[in-house]
Image (spheres, rainbow, N blue to C red):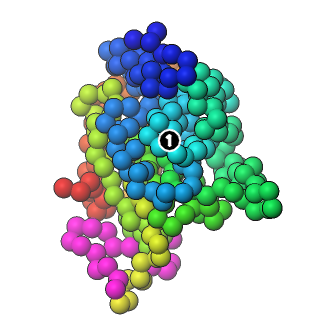
Amino acid sequence: ARAGARPGAPASVCAAVEAFAGEVLSPARQWFKIVGGAKAELIAEALRDAPPEGVILEIGTYLGYSALRLAMAHPDRRIVSLEVDPTHALTAQYLVAFAGLAHRIDIWSGHSQDLLRTLPAHYRRPGGGSALAVAGVFMDQCGSRFWADLEAIRATGLLLPGAVVVADNVLKPGAPLFLWQLFAGRGARDFEADVLSVEEFAMPGVEDWLGVARLRQRPAPAEGSAGAPGGEEGQPVAAEGAEADTVPEVVHDLEWVARCCRDRAESAGGSVSFEAWAAHSAKMRARLAELGIAPAA
């Protein structure tokens, strides 16, 4: 199956990557961090609700698989992808060129903290000003960066009203700060958020979540004002003022738990078994439910 990848045929390239995950890594109980299968379909479906104009910004290119999937699912859009690891960035550029989509996918190498500030300057209009407008964001970098990077994107002014943000792995290893900010913190007034439960690709029996948020056309009314949401039973109520900046200690604790599991999985020679991932997901789900964060029934 891996030999079936053909130059200029992105679907065959993605199929070869998926075959490697399914035929080689999954039987060896190893995780290949790509968003294949049902995850890829959910991501594509969520981003179809993005505004018709603008690019899709991906943070966390890895090997370029998801950039190819995004480009195929959205043939009228440019994909702008950021990757912190230069080796991964070079590999992704090669894969994208082999697949014949280098003219539609831009891959930038560097840390998101730096690239997000300078990216608009690389897309200038002939008469001045940035030509970059972001209709959708796919976040697949380290989960501890999700909220900081989303704030950085908003600070650039590039995020279009109604833009859709999709974040992977918000349950495993987890992105509790990102979720709390969207559901109950500073982001709750500006975004409509949900989480979608899905089995991790090529990891049978292991649950993960996708975080999906849409930037409101205008901020929601402040709590207690006319038209403000009252907070449905079992759902977190958005904090206001200083409370929105006060992150509960339990959220910091969950961030530490997520980081420990992430570091173990990414360390040289380290590994996390499928059973350990499943247990981690179940614990994270239970703790997040205590904060009122859970997939819709």
- Residue 195 visible here: yes
Report the magenta residues as a range: 227-245
The residue drawn where x is 30% and y is 49% is 196
Is 223 placed above or below 201 here?
A: below
- Residue ID for mark 1: 75
Is 102 placed above or below 291 here?
A: above
Q: Tag 1: Cα neighbours inside 10 Å, few (<14), some, or many (≥20)?
A: few
Q: Position of residue 63 (x, y in %)?
A: 55, 28
The residue drawn where x is 26% and y is 42% is 282
Q: Amino acid at mark 1?
A: Pro
Viewer-closest of 273 and 223: 223
View extreme (right): residue: 127
Q: Position of residue 113 (x, y in %)?
A: 66, 50
Q: Is residue 228 magenta?
A: yes
Main secondary structure type of the part rendered in magenta = loop
Q: Position of residue 135 (x, y in %)?
A: 52, 56
| Quadrant in the picture for the N terminus | top left
